[in-house]
Amino acid sequence: TVKIYVGGALNNSGIATGGDFSILISALAQGSNVIDAIATDALGNVSTTISSTIFVDSVAPVEPVYTDLPATINTTSYTITGTAEADSVVKLYIGDTLAASGNAAGGTFSILVPGLTENINVINTTATDALENISSTASSVIFVDMIPPAAPTITTNGGVNFSAYTGCFLLEGTCASDSYTIEVNNSTTGVHYTPGQTTWSAEAHLEIAVDDTFTVYAYDLVGNKSAPDSIHVTFLFAI
């Protein structure tokens, strides 16, 4: 008969049939458990004790926490960072589909997630420790927007090229309401625009005796760039 003790207390016993035994032990505690086994024959002779240690960890890791996860991006892949149980395996899902995984070395993770699609993406993240305990799921939403705003329109002089007798004049125009920034000749200097509005203006300048083309772009909140609109202005001398 083989008797199994856990921490000095009898836990279970069984028969070593043919010299082998298989005995279920239960109620193991979290952490280290000292296991002792003793065999007793039919005449009551008792063997020496063999000992071993079993470490029990059935506690799931804490739920991962995202770090500065943006609400909207303009790319189909993004590096998600955060914290999780040290050295756990962090798995990131788009919906129910595993997209990427990595190790939370030192309790932090930084994992590139590909396969994001236009519109709403539900990100679900779990941490799994070395004993396959799985944390609860951290969820968030990333909105992918790769569609640029409509091209702005220059309305000064009806949008038609014109001549000016002064080097300073006002360009005006319209734009889509999802525009966030208006640039004229790749600059916002002198541009007057409030995000969400549908009109804009810009203080334009010409050097003496120099013609110039003014090109306008609109950008949305995540940096998508519209098609341009342009107008050519010729500087004239007053006679």
Image: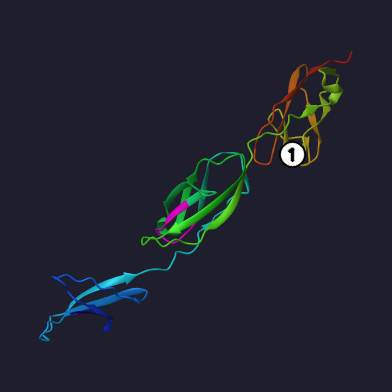
Above or below, 159 against 198 in this view is above
Residue at 64 percent of width and 39 percent of height: 145
Above or below, 135 against 165 in this view is below
Q: Quadrant of residue 107?
A: bottom left
Crowd tier of the residue under label 1, counting other residues whose Cα lies within 10 Å: few below 14, some 14–19, many 20 or above: some
| SS of the residue under disc 1 | loop
Quick one: quadrant of the N terminus? bottom left
Residue type at tag 1 = Asp
Please name whichever residue, 5 or 127, is drawn nearer the observer in this view of the structure: 5
Q: Which residues are magenta?
A: 83-91
* Magenta stretch contains residue 46: no
Please name whichever residue, 68 or 25, is drawn nearer the observer in this view of the structure: 25
Q: Position of residue 231 (x, y in %)?
A: 77, 21
With 142 as the anchor, is 125 left or right in this view? left
Quick one: quadrant of the C terminus? top right
Please name whichever residue, 145 or 134, is drawn nearer the observer in this view of the structure: 134
Q: Which residue was labeled with disc 1? A: 178
Please name whichever residue, 64 or 213, is drawn nearer the observer in this view of the structure: 64
